[in-house]
């Protein structure tokens, strides 16, 4: 198990170094400036084009998108699809458990600033949630998807692109006033770590099964 874990990490070291490096940098910003000041700075920066872009790019962090990917993998390798479904279930359950059990009632930006008497900008027509802010479920799912794809296909030439693209999806949660930076930071960390562990464990136990490399049909 340890050997497989080391192998998967080394083979995708670029992706993990970029992701954890950016997480560390963002955490430093969070510590230095605080979640309130950082959010208000981001909230003050907007354009109609970015409003449109982030409203749609954020859906790449939906659980349904992960399910769709896993379903399509059934037609390539059943083992890949099973691994994808399990990674989705583990990270989804983790996100909901943390949001609704451990950190239940944590105010999201709109409620947090409302209690301070500060009006924040929201996009007209977009539903903005008020509670269960920590951690960002969309961010957990987005990084679960990117980590899963990196481990599965070993996108060595695309690891930088995939890592930065996923951070853009995560940033959309702040831009759309759904989360604070700290929600996104921990969402990214949890999505990567739990997907890596789940993938490695399943690979260890399933990759030698006779059905693993066979498509659905």
Image (spheres, helix red, strand yellow):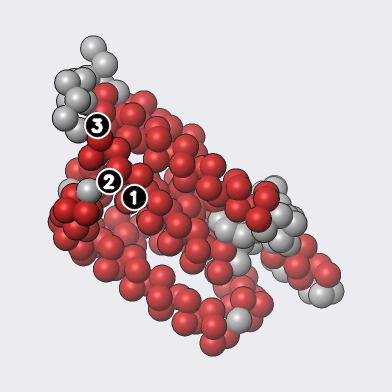
At x 19%, y 57%, the residue is 6
Residue 169 showing in the rendered view: no
Q: Earlier in the sequence, mark 1 or mark 3?
A: 1
Q: x, y percentage for residue 146?
A: 34, 50
Q: Which mark is residue 206?
A: 3
The residue lying toward the viewer, choosing from 141 and 119, is: 141
Q: x, y percentage for residue 160?
A: 25, 62
The Cα–Cα distance between marks 3 and 2, rounded to whole angstroms, is 10 Å
Look at the numbered disc 2 and give the secondary structure of its residue.
Answer: helix
Q: Which residue is mark 2?
A: 200
Q: Which mark is residue 78?
A: none
At x 32%, y 35%, the residue is 83
Residue 198 showing in the rendered view: yes
Q: Assess whether mark 2 and mark 1 are in contact (beta carbons under 8 angstroms).
A: yes
Horizontal side of 79 relative to 100 (left or right) equals left
Check the picture and name the quadrant holding the C terminus: top left
Q: x, y percentage for residue 114?
A: 81, 67
């Amino acid at each position: 198990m340890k050997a497989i874990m080391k192998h998967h990490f080394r083979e995708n070291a670029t992706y993990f170094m970029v992701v954890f490096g950016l997480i560390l940098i963002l955490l430093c910003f969070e510590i230095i400036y605080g979640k309130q000041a950082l959010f208000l700075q981001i909230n003050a920066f907007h354009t109609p084009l970015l409003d449109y872009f982030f409203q749609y790019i954020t859906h790449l962090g939906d659980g349904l998108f992960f399910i769709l990917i896993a379903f399509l993998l059934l037609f390539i390798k059943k083992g890949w699809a099973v691994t994808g479904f399990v990674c989705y279930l583990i990270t989804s359950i983790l996100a909901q458990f943390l949001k609704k059990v451990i950190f239940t009632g944590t105010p999201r930006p709109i409620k947090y600033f409302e209690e301070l008497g500060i009006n924040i900008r929201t996009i007209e027509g977009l539903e903005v949630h008020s509670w269960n802010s920590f951690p960002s479920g969309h961010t957990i799912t987005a990084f679960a998807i990117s980590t899963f794809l990196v481990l599965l296909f070993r996108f060595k030439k695309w690891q930088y692109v995939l890592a930065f693209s996923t951070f853009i999806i995560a940033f959309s949660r702040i831009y759309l006033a759904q989360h604070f930076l700290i929600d996104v930071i921990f969402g990214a960390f949890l999505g990567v770590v739990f997907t890596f562990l789940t993938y490695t464990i399943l690979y260890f136990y399933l990759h030698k099964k006779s059905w693993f490399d066979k498509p659905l049909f």
